[in-house]
Image (cartoon, rainbow, N blue to C red):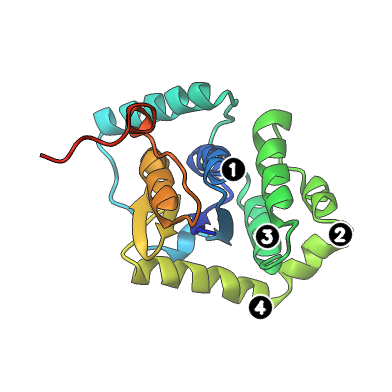
Amino acid sequence: MATVSFYFDCSTAASYVASVRLAEAALRTAATIDWRPVLPGDLPPAAPAGEAEARYARKDLGDWARFCGVRLAPDDAAPGPAEAAARFLASLAGDPRQRAAVEAWFGSLHYAGAPDLDAVAAAAGREARAIAAAGADPQARARLTANARELEALGGWRTPSFVVAGELFVGHERLSLVELALTQASERRIVPPGAHSQVVAGPPAAP
C-alpha cells in the first residue's frame, strides 16, 4: 500500500483544499495518508508575491474550491486557535482518528465560520481539555518543529506539500501528479489519469 506524507498548516485555505483533494486521491489509489502538521512560522519566510501574482493565486484557489465543491473562509484564522489545533493534531500522530480531527478543524473554520477546538477534540474521541494538554506538551511542539525540518530537508519550503516514495510535490495544484505517483507506487493495478484508453484498447503495439 502506497503512503503519502502530507505537510499542511491549520491556517490557510490552500491546505484545506489540499486535504479534501488528497483524501479523494487516497481513496482512488488505496493509499494511506501520513498527516504532518506544520506551523508556518517554523518554515523560512516566503518572498512576497507581486500584486498580479497574488491576485491570480486567490482566483486560482477559488477555482479549485469550486472544483472540489467546498466553501472557503478568508485566511484569517486566529493564530492562537490555529496553533492549538496544530499542536493537538501533532499529538495524534499514529492515531487512526487524526484524519477525522483534521477534517473537523477545517470544517469548523470554513463551514461553521469559526474555529471550534471542542469539535476537533470530539472528532478524535478526546475531551476538550485534551487541546490544552497538547498545547502544554513540549513533545507536541517538538513534532511540529520536526515536521518542518523534515520538509526543508526534502527540499520543501511551504505548505501544503506532499512526499511519495521520496519524491516531493509542492502546492495543492500538484495533486494530479501526487495521485499519479501513488498509483505508480501502489501494489494494486490502478489506472492512472491519462491511461484509461490503454485499458480499453490495450497498450500500444510494439513498433
At x 47% / y 47%, what residue is drawn?
Answer: 189
Residue type indicated by callout 3 = Leu
**Residue 198 in picture, x, y percent from top left:** 32, 32
According to the picture, the residue beneath numbered tag 2 turns out to be 126
Real-space Cα separation, disc 2 to disc 1, in angstroms: 26 Å
According to the picture, the residue beneath numbered tag 4 turns out to be 139
Real-space Cα separation, disc 2 to disc 3, in angstroms: 12 Å
**Residue 15 in picture, x, y percent from top left:** 51, 44
Disc on the earlier residue, 1 or 3: 1
Disc on the earlier residue, 2 or 1: 1
Q: Which is more toward the observer, 116 or 70?
A: 70
Q: Which one is in front in this view, the residue at disc 1 or the one at disc 3?
A: 1
Is 96 on the left-hand or right-hand side of 53?
A: right
Q: Is residue 89 above or below residue 73?
A: below
Is 114 on the left-hand or right-hand side of 79?
A: right
Secondary structure under tag 4 reads helix
Please say whether residue 73 is visible from this viewpoint: yes
Disc on the earlier residue, 1 or 4: 1
